[in-house]
Image (cartoon, coloured by chain):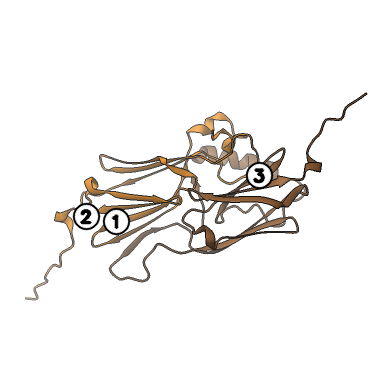
Chain colours: A brown, B orange
Amino acid sequence: MYRTLFPSDLVAELDRLQRKVQRFAGPSTGIRGFGRNSFPAVNVGGTPDSVEIYVFAPGLDPTTLNVTIERGVLTLSGARSSDLPADDKKVAVHINERFAGRFSRAVSLSDDVDPDRVTAKYSDGVLHISIKRRASAQPCRIEIH
Amino acid sequence: MTNANIAKNEPPRYEDSTMLPPVDVVEDDSGITLYADLPGVSKDKLSVRVEADVLNIEGEVTLPFATHIEASHAEVYLPRYHRAFTLGQELDREKVSAEFKNGVLKLHVPKAEHAKARKIEINVG
């Protein structure tokens, strides 16, 4: 199994893992799992008026990335070619940890996002997708007379 | 711009821990080539150093527009990468060359002239 990133502080990692397990030990989990140990790593966050998704996909040609939003699920897929030489007897491969091949990941979006207002930008190996929330879903102050 | 929100839910003691970036290392007659995945690191936040025998690769993650975001799911939760490799005497650490593009670092460490492969004749007596 490909691992995207390896934490180097084992004690801290075990501690973190334990708390993660406690947090996820609820009655149900997402049907697409947590998506750990897969390429590319994804961070999802939000602001009051947008959902921000960061996809850690280094070494890609952004034009080969497919990003679609359908029925509230954002799917991204593509392929990363290997930098390793193809079966050359004069070259020795000592470490081979980086992902190569086809990948696909899905992120469930909340109901209040507007799929028509999406921006996506690729820089430093990170794809940043920003999806605006619908105006009606944003908190507004109710005046009391 | 800050990275605090990447590890926002983690207590401060995690600030010293780092992520190990995945690497590929290949060797041919000319030397060793290393590829490292460092997504989110800009060129000015990347440091490649050789101290004594050790090659150190360090990078700091900066994400655009990440200041006011409440993280709901984070697989990259530490703001730094670090990985170190011990180089052998046969490698020429003075002539390390590096390229960094789209979050992938490519390093080439050539072999020292005296260490280049030469075929050893075997005499059958």
The CA distance from mark 2 to mark 3 is: 47 Å
Q: Which residue is mark 2?
A: B111
* Residue neighbourhood size for the residue with mark 3, other residues' Cα within 10 Å, grouped as few (<14), some (14–19), many (≥20): few
Q: Are marks 1 and 2 in contact (CB under 8 Å)?
A: yes
Residue at mark 1: chain: B
In terms of depth relative to the viewer, which is nearer, A65 or B8?
A: A65
Residue located 45% across and 48% down the image? B38
Q: Which residue is mark 1?
A: B32
Give the numbered dot on residue A21.
3
Q: Is residue A66 left or right of residue A22?
A: left
Q: Nearer the viewer, mark 2 or mark 3?
A: 2
Pinpoint residue A65: horizontal percent, then vertical percent.
56, 60
Single out the residue that lies furthest toward the top.
Answer: A145
Pinpoint residue B82: horizontal percent, then vertical percent.
42, 42
Q: What's the amino acid at mark 3?
A: Val
Please determine whether, in this image, residue B26 is positioned above or below residue B49. Answer: below
Asked if labels 1 and 3 share a chain, the reply is no
